[in-house]
Image (cartoon, rainbow, N blue to C red):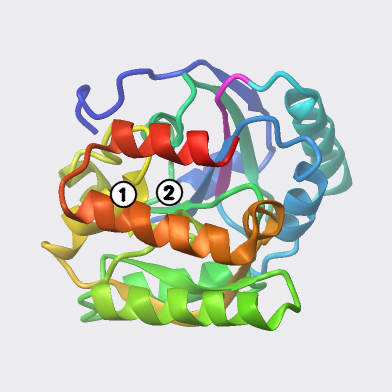
Amino acid sequence: MNNNSVTAQGSSSQINSSAFNSRAAEASGVSIIIPILNEADNLPRLFNNITSLKPLAQQVLLVDGGSTDQSLSVAERLIKQYNQQLANKDSTIEWQIIDSAAGRAMQMNTGAAQATGNILLFLHADTQLPEDAISRVKQVLNQANSNYKWGRFDVRLNSRQPLLWLVSTMMNARSRLTAIATGDQAIFITKSLFEQIGGYPQQPLMEDIQLCKNLKGIAKPACLTRRVTTSARRWQQHGTWRTILLMWHLRFDYWRGVSAEAIKQRYYKTNN
């Protein structure tokens, strides 16, 4: 990636893994990049999900944007426990904890710069991958004669509320129609294409939408019907209809050219 696309390289606090050298050489490895900021409560669930994937990811990078809770100590403890439990296994994950300036775009670019896999999968800390996520991603991007270089999963919200089921259904349909995905849908992309477009745009909000706009001009996305499960807390905390209307309005504003900075100010003003 060029220097302009990652303005903060971050400092890496690497947790050793006995199988790293052999796995890093795999041509089709997947690096999962997770931006975190005060996610101590979500980390145990996140680790359980990632370590239950079949097959495992080659690498997981937790990119911290300056957490003030126990995120770092919790992550270090969970990684240590994982490595101790699987010390004699041939198939293990290379874990890294990376320091970065705050901001999802910045954190994800910082993680991508240190990724060893040829496929990058960007995951939110409150999103759960399906068990076969790695094989699905590798299959669609690495199969012979594949035209796909990036894609996303369908999504479901972890709520039984009928209205939130409808929200996730509409999100999936809109994404398939427009070739625009949100970060909740676990966007994945070949590292070479990610570097070609300069990574995530350095903006405070709507970075995932702009990334997809840049990507779909080059290649169409693979829209996987397998679903990731993401938190419904945003809708539950602020009200379902209120959140739906706000997000529609913000997306419309971005579409008509309102700056990401202005949209961010309105988003946080409305949700405070």
Residue density around tag 1, few if under 14, some if 14–19, many if 20 or more, within 10 Å:
many
Q: Which residue is mark 2?
A: 117
Helix, strand or loop for disc 2: loop
Residue density around tag 2, few if under 14, some if 14–19, many if 20 or more, within 10 Å:
many
Which residue does the image show at 49% across and 44% down from the upper left? 24
Residue 209: x, y in percent?
31, 54
Q: Assign the magenta stretch its main secondary structure.
A: strand
Residue 65 magenta-drawn? yes
Which of the pair 235/198 is nearer the observer? 235
Image height check: is 161 above or below 26? below
Quadrant assignment for the C terminus: top right
Left or right? Give the position of 2 relative to 266: left
Residue 202: x, y in percent?
29, 31
Q: Which residue is mark 1?
A: 191
Query: Can residue 242 be seen here?
Result: yes
Query: How much space separates mark 1 and mark 2, taking CA atoms?
Result: 8 Å
Left or right? Give the position of 54 relative to 269: right
Badges 1 and 2: C-beta atoms under 8 Å apart?
yes
The quadrant holding residue 2 is top left
> Residue 23 — which label?
none
Which residue does the image show at 82% across and 38% down from the upper left? 78
Q: Which residues are magenta?
A: 59-66
Residue 81: x, y in percent?
87, 39
Q: Amino acid at mark 1?
A: Lys
